[in-house]
Amino acid sequence: MQPNLKNYERVESIHESTSGCVMCSTEELCQQALIHFYFFKDLKIQKMFKIGLLLCVASLVVANDVLEYTDANFDSNIVQHEIALVKFYAPWCGHCKRMAPEFDKAAASLKLNDPPVALIKVDCTVETKVCGRMGVNGYPTLKIFKNGEVSADYNGPRDADGIVKYMRTKAGPTSKQLNSVEEAEKFLSNVDHSVVGFFKSADSPLAAEFKKVADQLAENYRFAQTSNPDVLAKYGHEDQLVIYQPPRLQVKLLPSEVVYSGPASANQMRQFVKDEIHGLVGHRTVANAGDFKNPLVVVLFNVDYVKDVKGSNYVRNRVIKVAQKLKKEAINLNYAISSVTDFAQELSEFGIESPEADTKYIVGRGARNEKFKFDGDFSVDNLEKFARDLAAGNLQPYMKSEPVPESNPDAVRTVVAKNFEQVVNDESKDVLIEFYAPWCGHCKSLAPKYEELAKKLSEESEVVIAKMDATANDVPAQYDVRGFPTIYFAPRNNKRSPLKYEGGREVDDFVKYIARHSTNPLAGYDRTGKKVKAKSDL
């Protein structure tokens, strides 16, 4: 057997042996465990061989640094890592393929971190159980795990250096250790809310559960813990979790701290933090808007906690008075103040264009995300009436809508928010509706096929093919539209739970889908989508 080299005369075979491993040649043949030992007479060939060998070994090492888990071993293995980044992927996914070498490189660096950060991959086309349990619905999906539990979704960079830097920050302590009264005072003077654990012993069950909460929520909130006797004495807490309002939001009408009084349970403590972090009336910003749940009442004005703390809290105090009064009557709403400037785009969704900075606006969201707005001036009485009416269901929702078309020359029925109920929720029709955007290239490509579909099914009296501009009209809550085009099928007997269309976008694909899902059999097609011959053709 001779080596596959052009300059074979410059290489001398000196030994031959067998091995238990499989060797792969440059021709991608992995066939026998026979090893040849050669002496390279030429220094240039020696150097080339050394470089090639180093690259080969390096690639093997990098590949092995990423761990691969399965349905069978995921749960038992993930708990072994203090911190891990798990990539849920599909082999055919283009984004996954592009990310793979960067993920491999990052794994080689992060395994040397202190503490080590494990990088793990799970093939969701095979390991369907764990991927389903983790709610994976797109690829790649990346999640950060700490001590076997999901800590947060990974929203960092996708290149090797970026992954390394991002995960090193996550591998650090999620809760700051307060070793003195001075450190505690400095921590609590921050402009953001603070969550502090006071523990007589750092090894107590409550401290362990507190750490889990910090690991899970540190991306959103600030955590600290202490067992320092001076700090415990200064703040008067022992074996307690306490939420502190930042100095700018501390007012006489509300307590500056809220104490957790439940059991040592990470789940209950986590929910407590989420529920109480902003207090009765929070300062809602772009960064924390997701914390404020419906039903929600918001007063928007020129909030400025840098230059005008007193003025900002003057308005907030009036909202607090209304919130306290209604809370005593068991009228449960959430309340917030927000900046007109920061939420100008949101105000446009309520029909408020070009909002003025010196005007106070009252808006609200219902439990089903319906939109409500108050058209009068801001006052405590007006705010109270608006809140009461919202809670009682006495308000008419605001609806962003184009005018109802006077005519419909195309085969596809044009729907707007104002006639959505009449057309799409017509209990006598099965409706296929496309939510589109005028600027969307995919929507433009679909348009002629969608029109052809409508013409093809024009004789089907119980089927409507419709479309709606989702950028100019409010989309009902039961339709989850996050991209364009998004297509739903609303059967006549189940308008509250429409089916999201996930099939192909050729005319025949749509016909087969409608034929299969229509409430009653189509007149011109069987359930497989094949055209039914007319009696005259038989």
Image (spheres, helix red, strand yellow):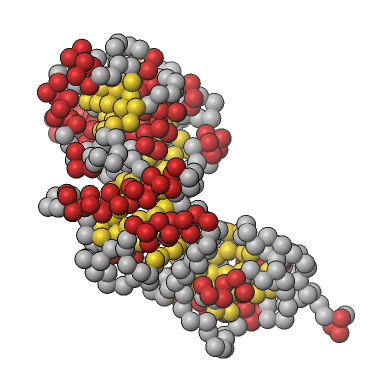
Q: Please give the name of the residue rendered at 57% of the width and 86% of the height, measured from the top-left corner.
A: 408
Quadrant containing the N terminus in the rendered view: top left
- Residue 427 image point, x, y percent: 70, 68
Q: Is residue 165 above or below residue 366?
A: above
Left or right of residue 387: residue 163: left
Q: Is residue 465 above or below residue 363?
A: below
- Residue 48 image point, x, y percent: 19, 34
Q: Is residue 38 above or below residue 351?
A: above
Q: Is residue 355 above or below residue 324?
A: below
- Residue 232 image point, x, y percent: 23, 16
Q: Which quadrant of the view contains residue 358?
A: bottom left
For this rendering, which residue is in front, 498 or 19? Answer: 498
- Residue 80 image point, x, y percent: 40, 19
Q: Is residue 383 visible?
A: yes
Q: Which quadrant of the view contains residue 77?
A: top left
Left or right of residue 176: residue 27: right
Quadrant containing the C terminus in the rendered view: bottom right
